[in-house]
Image (cartoon, rainbow, N blue to C red):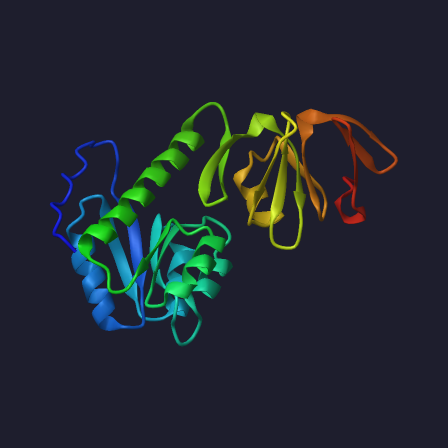
Amino acid sequence: GANRRPLPPDTDTNNDPMTCIAVDDEPLALELMESYIAQLPGLELKGTFTDAISAWGYLQRNPTDLVFLDIQMPDITGLQLARSMDRRQPLIIFTTAYANYAVDGFAIDAVDYLLKPFEFSRFQDAVNKAISYKRLQDAATNSTESAIFVKSDYQHIRIPTEEILYIEGFDDYIRIHLESGKSVYTLMSLKSVLEKLPEQAFLRIHRSFIVAIKKIQRIHNQQVYISDKTLPIGKSYVAT
């Protein structure tokens, strides 16, 4: 493709560089990633890993903003590694030589996926996406109004937590019921979404339901009444 001039580096000193690691079983691919990352002041490379297990061990001990993750690796695939990262989930950019993996990547809520071999300009686009998304996340975390970001229909949607009535869990996705009567569907577990929500405002009452405590109208006979819905309280979730 045509060579594009790199964008000027971000001069906003308030934004620390994003920490990142790269995981790929091909040393040459990692060398290329290192050279690309070195050209972007917005990124700080903390390590490269040739197998998913070592990378997983590192991520358990070190909060990391962004992971460049090869999908095809011999021990554990990148998809399996991504699925195992539940708490403090970093942003993920998949790298793959196979176009058919793109759909899997989006199912796991990846920021982007890079089809090998990719040029620096394409890499930079993906990183800019990740930086923008992290800023949105940070802004949502730091603002007085609490909100969560979820991925739905290939876009990240901001949902103010005040608008949530309750959340319903299915096998591999959840449905967020809002005060407006609308619902948002996203591929995520109830456990994962509960970790994003303010602890004092939401309660899991059943293996399939999380409720907004403020929105409960009454509790009667092992049931919670919210809006015009009656939700069951699971035996193992009854408060002692």
Relative placement, left or right, of 164 versus 60 is: right
Q: Residue furthest bottom?
A: 74
Q: In which quadrant is the N terminus drawn?
A: bottom left
Query: What x and y, as percent, mark residue 202?
Result: 63, 34
Q: In which quadrant is the C terminus drawn?
A: top right
Q: Residue at x 41, y 36 (%)?
A: 137
Q: Observer-nearest residue: 224 or 99?
A: 99
The image quadrant that residue 227 belongs to is top right
Total numbered circles: 0
The image quadrant that residue 12 belongs to is top left
Query: What x and y, as percent, mark residue 114?
Result: 31, 58
Relative placement, left or right, of 120 versus 140 is: left
Relative placement, left or right, of 152 versus 116 is: right
Q: Observer-nearest residue: 224 or 157?
A: 157
Above or below, 104 relative to 165: below
Q: Residue furthest front?
A: 1
The image quadrant that residue 34 belongs to is bottom left
Q: Residue at x 24, y 66 (%)?
A: 30
Above or below, 34 relative to 163: below
Query: What x and y, as percent, mark residue 54?
Result: 38, 67
Query: What x and y, as percent, mark residue 107?
Result: 49, 54
Q: Residue furthest right?
A: 221
Q: Residue at x 45, y 58 (%)?
A: 103
